Amino acid sequence: MELPTSFFGWVAFLLDKYGMLFLQGALFTIVIALTGTVIGFLIGLLVAILRTVPVGAKDSRVKRIGLKALSVILSVYIEVFRGTPMIVQAMVIYYGTMQLGLRMPVLAAAIFIVSINTGAYMAEIIRGGIISVDKGQKEAATAIGMTHWQSMIHVVLPQAVRNIMPSIGNEFVVNIKDSSVLNVISVNELFFMSKSAAGTYLRYFEVFFITACIYLVLTFTVTRLLRVLERKMDGKVNYTIYGSQSDSQASIKLVKEGEVPID
């Protein structure tokens, strides 16, 4: 078989020969990044809510000590996973658990590692989103008898999540790229598959040029989809509310601040 002699000839040849391998790797990358981001968001959400539980002077000593101890544990979790590289975490968790007699399936281990790593970052992102919501919202919820959890779920978090959507999207994009470090535990993601393809003909430049393009397409597509989602969450510019006024229906058009009213 005659081999290509030009750069783009090799690119076309490798795509034809290993196209399914690249596709399989890209699919694994998306699955790991998406699942890890969703689970990490839920972990971060729980951690952020727990760290914002108010402690009053009237609370029992047991509650105050318990919450303080929990806050310390959660702070250690956040600092450890934000302060160490994911590649090191992958090695420690995967091979460490193996030495303890627990052999995790590679895909499950990859999702677990990305999830707990993302959870540490999400906890701080969500906590910042909670703090950004006006305190009056929380006080109003408390005034009508809502508990801390109820006010968080029904009042604060819906506003906080919208505020932090760009940061959540950024974490997803970061996870797509950072999933490449999981090749150290032999996860069949895009980078690992690319190494396999490159090793056959020793065409590393051409193979990783293709890999870079695939990563770019993935991150660009995800970024654009997230921007569409953000616009959807913003809602409409104009709202119409129907109610009774002097026993007759009246419509009131509410216009967002900064917008020009439309007659």
Image (tube, rainbow, N blue to C red):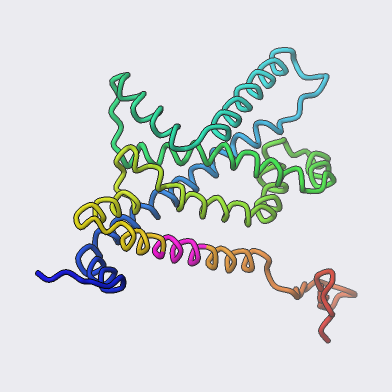
Q: Residue 97 at what x, y percent from top left?
A: 35, 24
State the residue at coordinates (44%, 32%): 88
Q: Residue 242 at what x, y percent from top left?
A: 77, 73
State the residue at coordinates (29%, 69%): 11
Please tell me in which quadrant of the rendered image residue 102 appears: top left
Give the answer, above or below, for where 101 lies relative to 38: above
Q: In the image, is 36 to the left or to the right of 209?
A: right
Q: In the image, is 60 to the left or to the right of 36?
A: right
Question: Magenta stretch containing residue 220, yes or no?
Answer: yes
State the residue at coordinates (61%, 27%): 74
Q: Provide the residue span drawn in magenta.
A: 213-222
Q: Quadrant of the N terminus?
A: bottom left
State the residue at coordinates (59%, 42%): 122
Q: Main secondary structure of the magenta part?
A: helix
Q: Residue 113 at what x, y percent from top left?
A: 43, 37
Please tell me in which quadrant of the rendered image residue 163 appears: bottom right
Which of the two residues, 199 or 72, is positioned nearer the viewer here?
199
Give the answer, above or below, for where 106 lies relative to 193: above
Which of the two residues, 166 or 25, is positioned nearer the viewer here?
25
Q: Name the residue furthest front.
A: 5
Q: In the image, is 170 to the left or to the right of 11?
A: right
Which of the two residues, 21 or 57, is positioned nearer the viewer here?
21
Give the answer, above or below, for where 57 lies relative to 39: above
